Image: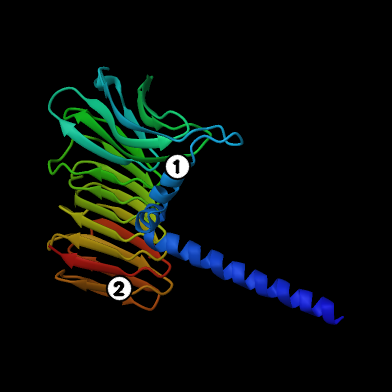
Amino acid sequence: MKKTGLIILIVICLVIFFSALTGGVLLTLRTVGWQALLDRTQLQERVDTLLERMGPLDIFPLTITRRDIDETRELDWDLAQVRTIQISAVSDRVTVLPVDHGGSARLNGVYRGTGDVGLVVVKQGDVLSIRVDYPRFGMSFSDLSLQVSLPAGYRGTVKVTTVSGAIDLPADRSQDWDALDLKSVSGAIQVANAANAGVTFSTVSGQVSLKELGAPVSGKTTSGKLDLSFSRAAPTTLHAVSGDITLHLPISSDIKLDYTTVSGRFSHEGLDLNVTTQGSRKVSAQSGQGSQTVTVSTTSASLHLTAH
């Protein structure tokens, strides 16, 4: 009986230890993101160096090789017939830029792995797909950037999907795109000017910064902070678990706010906001005629409105 009790105690201690360890790892990943954790610990570089020093092994015949990648594909289709451009990557930084003439996709940087990586551009019907193609099996590390240049006259939807890579639309001029659909797990999402495009986004832990918004916005996050700046008020629907939300609005905005939360806090400054309901879990307010509805729901994330 004593031995049985000791075994049970040891098992319980092991369960508690591994549960705490797993919880700590998950909390760290949710807080800083997978890619940021790799950068801080330099784990990717350490494993890469170790594998290169080991060289090929009989029991592990695949060899880690280092290659400098620089591939460019011209987008020489008639983009007037394209309604959706889908851009997908894994850990690669994706930058989308408008250009006055033509268009192209360029993949460049350093790749280390057991297989080949390449840039694939395919048009099927009215959908143009641009993706970084990694080997299905084996081990790989990369520091790659994918830059997509789109003709300024392109109209349609731009979809960008990454896992840990950042999504960046740095152009400060407005585009003619109908919509932006941006998805990332831990990579940051940044858009400098989305005045004419409706924006849909989702992220787990990546921070989101959207500027010059003027069309409908819909987004969700788990723990990534949201910072949204509007050139004019627009219908907005946001959902967050623990990532705090800041909305920058013109002083003369006509909005109707509906904010629900479990434990988040609400604050505002600079706006002529008439708060009609303010409880621990719900806030209702209106500015101006309230013609644009802003709906925000969170678990513990706080909401702050400010005028600019």
Q: Which residue is mark 2?
A: 266
Q: Earlier in the sequence, mark 2 or mark 1?
A: 1
Q: Amino acid at mark 1?
A: Arg
Mark number displayed over residue 125: none
Q: 93 or 111, which is in the foreground? A: 111
Nearest to viewer (mark 2 / mark 1): 1
Residue 116 appears at what percent x and percent y?
43, 28
**Amino acid identity at mark 2:** Phe
Q: Position of residue 244 (x, y in %)?
A: 32, 66
Q: For this view, does 118 lie left or right of residue 103? A: right
Give the residue furthest to the right: 1
On screen, residue 61 versus residue 30, left or right, reads right
Marks 2/1: CA distance? 54 Å
Residue located 17% across and 33% down the image:
98
Name the element at disc 2. Answer: strand
Mark identifier at residue 53: 1
